[in-house]
């Protein structure tokens, strides 16, 4: 999904609300958070006011000081699915340069990162994984049909989908062009 400057402004509001809420939940003053994070109190005041375009490094330091994940700071506070983020985290100075945090998953052992390409008509059946495994799929070219049991889930270019992989699933390319996607297996 493409994010414009309006959406970037909404992420600044999310950061503002989340930092304030999480700081209060941790029973910390801005001064205490500044000392613990190494971020100036002046910067924290600006962040909480939604006035400051903050660097990813600064957000990492604030998240660590609050003992939360980076994604907890940028995610919309009213998000129904806490694993699905899909927020612009960084916009470069050159139009089109960006970093979008799509999703998060808690992993206790390892994560596998795969690049896949299925040509038109190709099908890959997969056995169910062990309980606790999940997959994250991001399609960057074509359209992938993910079969979860007998239920198809179409994932177009620029979209992503996450699912518990302890169920029968398969990948299909029913389109006319190659489907290229990234697949994370969270073990």
Image: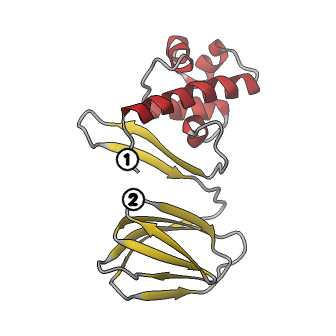
Which residue in the protein does label 2 denote? 158
> Is 88 located above or below residue 34 in the figure?
below
Front-most of 163 and 143?
143
Residue 88 lies in what quarter of the image? top left
Work out which quarter of the rendered image holds the C terminus and state it: bottom right
Residue 178 lies in what quarter of the image? bottom left
Which residue in the protein does label 1 denote? 2
* Residue that appears at 71% across and 19% down: 28
Camera sees residue 170 = yes
Relative horizontal placement of residue 26, taking residue 119 as reference (left or right):
right
Residue 157 location (% of width, % of height) = 37, 64
* Residue that appears at 57% across and 42% down: 71
Q: Secondary structure at mark 1?
A: loop
Q: Secondary structure at mark 2?
A: loop
Camera sees residue 187 = no
Front-most of 37 and 160?
160
Q: How is the image coloured?
A: secondary structure
Q: Earlier in the sequence, mark 2 or mark 1?
A: 1
Residue 121 location (% of width, % of height) = 37, 88
* Residue that appears at 60% across and 18% down: 35
* Residue that appears at 56% across and 40% down: 70
Front-most of 71 and 176?
176
Please give the label number shown on residue 139: none
Mark 1 surroundings within 10 Å by alpha-carbon count, few (fewer than 14), some (14 through 19), many (20 or more)? few
Relative horizontal placement of residue 153, taking residue 129 as reference (left or right):
left
Residue 159 lies in what quarter of the image? bottom left
Alpha carbons under labels 2 and 1: distance apart: 9 Å
Dots 2 and 1: beta carbons under 8 Å?
Answer: yes
> Is 177 located above or below residue 25 in the figure?
below
> Is 129 located above or below residue 11 in the figure?
below
Residue 40 location (% of width, % of height) = 52, 15
Front-most of 103 and 161?
161
């Amino acid at each position: 999904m493409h994010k414009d400057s309006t959406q970037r402004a909404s992420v600044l509001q999310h950061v503002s609300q989340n930092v304030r809420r999480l700081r209060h939940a941790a029973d910390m003053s801005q001064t205490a958070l500044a000392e613990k994070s190494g971020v100036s109190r002046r910067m924290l005041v600006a962040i909480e006011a939604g006035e400051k375009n903050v660097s990813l490094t600064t957000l990492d330091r604030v998240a660590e000081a609050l003992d939360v994940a980076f994604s907890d700071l940028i995610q919309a506070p009213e998000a129904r699915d806490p694993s699905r983020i899909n927020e612009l985290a960084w916009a470069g100075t050159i139009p089109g340069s960006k970093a979008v945090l799509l999703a998060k998953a808690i992993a206790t052992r390892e994560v596998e990162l795969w690049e896949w390409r299925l040509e038109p008509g190709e099908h890959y059946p997969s056995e169910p994984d062990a309980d606790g495994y999940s997959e994250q799929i991001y399609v960057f070219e074509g359209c992938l049909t993910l079969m979860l049991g007998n239920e198809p889930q179409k994932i177009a270019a620029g979209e992503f989908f996450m699912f518990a992989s302890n169920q029968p699933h398969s990948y299909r390319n029913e389109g006319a062009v190659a489907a290229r996607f990234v697949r994370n297996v969270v073990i």
